[in-house]
Image (cartoon, rainbow, N blue to C red):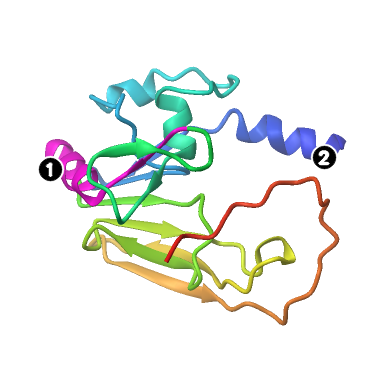
Amino acid sequence: VKLWKTFTDCFNCLPVAAVVDEKILCMHGGLSPDLKQLSQIARLERPTDVPDQGLLCDLLWSDPEADITGWAENDRGVSFTFGADVVSKFLQKHDFDLVVRAHQVVEDGYEFFADRQLVTIFSAPNYCGEFDNAGAVMSVDESLMCSFRILKPTEKHKFGFSANRPLTPPRKR
């Protein structure tokens, strides 16, 4: 428990988003309808408890959704889902080329969305021993070319995680 608390305390101090060479925005979750200016992210207080709604919540918990336009309620019960149109408008407004996020199990370790304007990267193969997903790590070179290293899943077996821990659900297909 003490080690878990140490990791939690560390993560609570980390920035919630990062920008790579003024062209790639990275975060755990996704975009937010409350995000009007990037300076709002810099003003987020850390460490802090994550609220049930608002910018910080969305940067950590929102999800892209292929079958919608605009914003919609998230089936997870927190934050929103957003369509490809939201990604395109955001990138154009802020002069970015790509949004990079995590937060969802994807079968091949990474998955593009919105005509390759957003990529979900999931680095944990065989997530919690419950999925047969690959993991991936993305590298960005000096010219901002992105490449992926795939972490192949192993034969499925249980890792002994607590049954009380909620899993990140896989992407809908």
Q: Quadrant of the N terminus?
A: top right
**Of the image marks 1 and 2, the number of the one nearer the N terminus:** 2
Q: Is residue 6 magenta?
A: no
Residue type at mark 2 is Leu
Gap between marks 1 and 2, in whole Å?
Answer: 42 Å
Q: Is residue 144 above or below residue 8?
A: below
> Where, by quadrant of the figure, is residue 118 drawn?
bottom left
Count the marks.
Answer: 2
> Which residue in the protein does label 1 denote?
92
Say which residue appears at 58% left-offset and 71% top-offset: 133
Q: Quadrant of the C terminus?
A: bottom left
Residue type at mark 1 is Gln
Q: On residue 3, which mark appears?
A: 2
> Which is more toward the observer, 1 or 19?
1
Q: Residues within 10 Å of mark 2 (few under 14, many from 20)?
A: few
Q: Position of residue 10 (x, y in %)?
A: 66, 33
